[in-house]
Image (cartoon, helix red, strand yellow):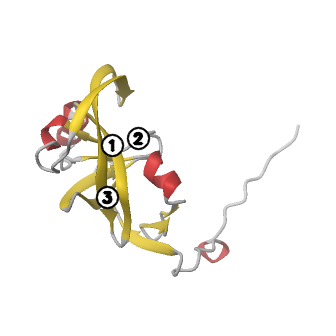
Amino acid sequence: MAIFGFYQPSMKDIAIPDSKNYKKIKFRISKTNHLVIKAKINGTSGEFILDTGASNSCVGFECIATFNLNATHSSTLAAGAGAVGMATQVATQNSLKIGRWSDPDFALVVFDLSHVNSALQQHKAKPVDGIIGADVLIKGRAIIDYANLTLHLKV
């Protein structure tokens, strides 16, 4: 019978890229163990879950006015976090700023996030304005440094 070992690197084994090419952004861990990050959409600050499993970044319907979004109907139905078949809208041509990293042509999905915030509040965690998903993480060639609670995004 074979026994497999796993290599667990120490922080000195992990090289974070040159800071000239990557912007370093702090995040915090919520009471529910979610990664929470501050970001600005169209110049307005909000709190977002950093979610590597979410394919698209999104905000709730209640945030359309807050973030000055021009949301239009979408035929795509959303699913995730225990809910399926949810109606969506899409908002394009927005600016996103996370720390010193920015995307001047950012699109996001708008849908009912009340189930997410309800679950957070049941665990005495603060509600969020939305989710920063894999679309941003891929575009920014993200590196998440859990030990130092930092997200690194390439400029």
Residue bearing the label numbered 1? 108
Q: Secondary structure at mark 2?
A: loop
Residue bearing the label numbered 3? 96
Q: Nearer the viewer, mark 2 or mark 3?
A: 3
Q: Position of residue 86 (x, y in %)?
A: 29, 22
Which residue, as the protein is rendered here, is positioned at the far right?
1
> As shown in the figure, which amino acid type bears the numbered disc 1?
Leu
Residue 39 in sight:
yes
> As shown in the figure, which amino acid type bears the numbered disc 3?
Leu
Q: Secondary structure at mark 1?
A: strand
Looking at the image, is 36 positioned above or below residue 10? above
Pointer 2 or 1: first along the chain:
2
How many angstroms separate mark 2 from mark 3 (CA)?
14 Å
Alpha-carbon neighbours of circle 1 within 10 Å: few (<14), some, or many (≥20)? many
Residue positioned 80% across, 47% down in the render: 4
Query: Do the CB atoms of the residues marked 2 and 1 lie less than 8 Å apart?
Result: yes
- The answer to which image quadrant residue 118 occupies is top left
Pointer 2 or 3: first along the chain:
2
Residue bearing the label numbered 2? 56
